Amino acid sequence: MPNNSSETSGLAQGWVSQPEGRGTLSILLSCLTTIFLCSWSVLCLNIPEPGLSRWGFLKYKLRWQLFAIFFPEIVTSMAAEQWESANQSVNEFHRLGHPQWTMRHAFFADMGGFMLRCPDFPSFPVNSEQLAYLIERDHLRYPDVDQEMIWDRNKADGFARLVTTVQFTWFFIQCLARWAQRLAISTLEVTTFATILATLNTLYFWYHKPLDVGTPIVLETNSRIADILVKAGDRASKPYSQTPLDFLKSPPVSTSIVAPFWFALGVLVDFDKGPLPRPTKSFVNHETRPPAGITTRETIYGILFEFAYFGVHLSGWNQLFPSSTERYLWRASSLILLGLLVMYLIAVPTGVVSSRAFSRRWLAKEVSTPLEVAAQLPRWAQLAVHGPFLLLYSLARSYVLLEGLISLRALPLSAYVDITWANYVPHF
């Protein structure tokens, strides 16, 4: 749709140099640098498969960085659920009489940091919930591992994180100052501001999680897996999918914000392309189930965070765009993202209330959460239910990112005006 003169009169067309004031290049570099630093330094991934080369690990992390650029709010939700799981682990170990167990220990366990070696079975990783079970039933001694030993395996670059913190803090201050002085902020800067908001929350939740750990700590036990399973009783009689201790795996959390996304993504791209090796040698990053579920406090936090994150994009509602089509698409994308969140908030309590009755009547199974019901549906039904929502979500996110770049060809004139910092200096 072509612009009329009234729509373009307040725009600076084309590339703007910066000998005096801001320019297109400075806006672009500032945003891309901030997004890159946020998406790279914030990632605290689980320990990968053993034997992965440096190049393989780099590709592994780059794939997650690309994901973090597109869906930083999902990464934050992952970090929040891992934090909740670690927090519950600390409480459980303290109950068992091990006050030296810390958040750092819990994160290390849940990321695959402890590998169990049994006399009758190949080694496999154990998370903090499984570790507590083994220790409580005397199958394993409490590991003689202090915080320093774990942190020695941490490859966090303090300087890199300092640079990241300085960069996004300065960017954050600039955006607030521009807003206070009624100077235009580009849509790319709006997107970057939202990324910073997500990064701040992620950094908080992953503060105690080691970064880029390459190898786990092996724990020896004299107990045979067969004996552990026999003593566990009927609940350990079902075949396992990842490790023999799968019977300790908590069911899907009905109030999880991130679990439906991963389920829908798995349905859409068909993750299950063949049998996986058993037992697994590492834990996937996207599946964390706090043993006691997600607390009301965490649920409220998650809802408020998501509204704040998506609400940032609505700040560009009255922004001058290169074309009216782009303005309407930006508004539509922002509303879609917010609308899908509202639909989710309606669907979750509805699903929790109706899941058990629905599964009994239509599936002849006894399940209690919406995701467990969804897992029992035929693939075509899963695609019909989850596919449209994930596609809408992905398209809206992609357009928001794309518009941030293509709108640089025509920004409001005041977007190139520098902040008058003297306004904030006291005059005597």
Image: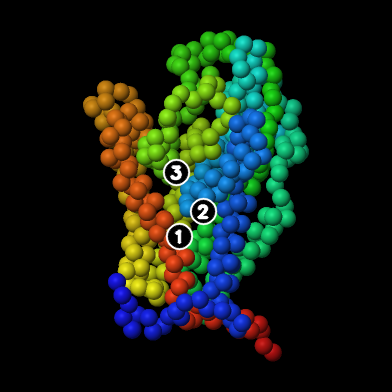
Between 44 and 100, the one lying in front of the other is: 44
The C terminus appears in which quarter of the rendering?
Answer: bottom right
Query: To which residue does mark 1 refer?
Result: 401
Indicate which disc, 2 or 1, sits on the residue closer to the N terminus. Answer: 2
Q: Is residue 427 left or right of residue 186?
A: right
Quick check: 53 above or below 363?
below
Residue at the spot 44% in from the left edge and 75% down from the top edge: 410
Identify which amino acid the numbered label 3 is placed on.
Val
Identify which amino acid the numbered label 1 is placed on.
Leu
Q: Secondary structure at mark 1?
A: helix
Q: Quadrant of residue 104?
A: top right
Estimate the spatial distance between the alpha carbons at disc 3 and disc 2, rounded to whole Å.
16 Å
Point out the frontmost of discs 3 and 2: 2
Q: Is residue 67 left or right of residue 49?
A: left
**Label annotation for residue 69:** 2
Mark 3 burial class by Cα count in 10 Å: few <14, some 14-19, many 20+: many
Estimate the spatial distance between the alpha carbons at disc 1 and disc 3, rounded to whole Å.
21 Å
The N terminus appears in which quarter of the rendering?
Answer: bottom left
Query: To which residue does mark 3 refer?
Result: 258
Point out the frontmost of discs 1 and 3: 1
Residue at the spot 31% in from the left edge and 75% down from the top edge: 2
Residue at the spot 39% in from the left edge and 35% down from the top edge: 270
Q: Is residue 231 visible?
A: no
Q: Is residue 266 left or right of residue 427?
A: left
Image coordinates for residue 235, horizontal then vertical, percent: 46, 17
